[in-house]
Amino acid sequence: MKKQRPKEVKARGTKDGKIRVAFIIAELAPGGAEKALVHLVLGLDRERFESVVYSLSGRERDRKNSLAPLLRANGIETVELGMRSLWNLPTTFWRLRTLLKRQAPLLAQSFMFHANLIGRFSARAAGVPIVCSGIRVAERDSKIRLSLDRLTKSFVDVWVCVGESTAEFTRVVGKIPASRVVSIPNGVKTVNIDGRVRVVTAGNANSALSLRDEPTEPLEIIPPFGVRKRLITVGRLSRQKGIDWLLENARKWLTEERSRDWELWIVGDGEEKERLLRIVAAQGLEKDVFFTGWRPDCVDLVERSDLILLPSRWEGTPNVLLEATAVGKPTLCARVEGVEEILGDSDWQICDWGDVDAWTSKCVKLMDNEDLRIKLGLRNQKRVLNEFTVERTTEKYIRLWKKLAENKGFHIMDTI
């Protein structure tokens, strides 16, 4: 029997032998998944890869702070497909399939549920050889999404999870074959300026430390805010993030006496905002809790805070936790996916979700003990800078893609 020759990657590359990659994401508003995509795309060697980013969303609210101009400014072709609701799904599928046939990528890498679902069908219909779906969180709130992933698993070569705990959830609860699930944690990008570690992030307002160029309006501080030590939580105002639970129990650790020295900042927007405001009023926290809305300079706000809180009900690899620990901040987190992987064995900083007594005890200890906060912050920083960098994350993706390509018979050894 004649031995089959490896397929040349040039059949799916550019004229100069680069590897074409299609990145597909639900939207490009600057959340954790979106920033992770930007860092990955911009971290790829342009001599070896040619990337196109496809964003499903056509909603105005997603375009307001979109990272699409940032990608284009860095020479990355970015296509917004205009999907505003599920009624646009057939049109979005067909348009994406047409664009993928034209691009002819070797592989498609998608992020987030809707992009995963539409992307895998469009990519297969377009004849894309390799299809990878990115799992950003453990889908504890949607059995339908888990079922759809399971029913369409034949369209996917591999599920890329943002951490081992999310990968385990995908294997056990999602019932995806273990051989097709891998873990690649998020990474954080930093620079050292005069001996001080600073985070470089898509969305940071400080252009010297940012992938963005446009400035932002200064944050208006209304007294009594801005004069006390700061607790801060950052994230979409949704049930997943557990901010309702945090506020309902806040007076147990942010007592009236302790609030003379401390205030709580909540950075983010979302569907839960009005409900959270009602909880603040019911708990008498109006002078102690400050809602900033979404802030492109949230990393700067975190850096100027004293203690970071993460009360999420479920996660993947929390981007804000990576950024906060990279600049040496202590944190108190619910024991959800990704937290123990980032923090390691750090009992003072982790509680079981919903354990009010443990949360109160640890939060009070951290608020009252500056030396402990400094010690934990330095420990966190060392661990994250050693193990969770954008460069390591990018290299892991490249090694995965190379393995998948060679398993499909594509010879890319000289290209990747």
Image (cartoon, rainbow, N blue to C red):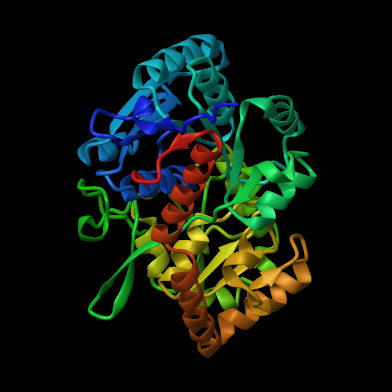
Give the residue drawn at x 68%, y 46%. Answer: 138
Q: Kindly tell me whether residue 23 is visible in this rendering.
A: no
Give the residue drawn at x 68%, y 29%. Answer: 153
The residue nearer to you, when weighing 68 against 98, is: 98
Give the residue drawn at x 39%, y 48%. Answer: 40
Q: Is residue 356 above or below residue 277?
A: below
Indicate left or right for 202 with 350 as reference: left
Q: Is residue 44 above or below residue 101?
A: below
Rendering coords of residue 190 (x, y %): 34, 65
Direction bottom: furthest residue: 371
Rendering coords of residue 173 (x, y %): 79, 43
Circle count: 0
**Quarter of the rendering containing residue 54:** top left
The residue nearer to you, when weighing 241 against 133, is: 133
Q: Is residue 217 above or below residue 366?
A: above
Give the residue drawn at x 47%, y 31%. Answer: 5
Q: What quarter of the picture does the N terminus occupy?
A: top right
Q: Kindly tell me whether residue 63 is visible in this rendering.
A: yes
The residue nearer to you, when weighing 30 against 111, is: 111
Direction front: furthest residue: 1
Indicate left or right for 350 with 55 as reference: right
Rendering coords of residue 337 (x, y %): 66, 56
**Quarter of the rendering containing residue 7:** top left
Rendering coords of residue 27 (x, y %): 44, 32
The residue nearer to you, when weighing 400 against 58, is: 400
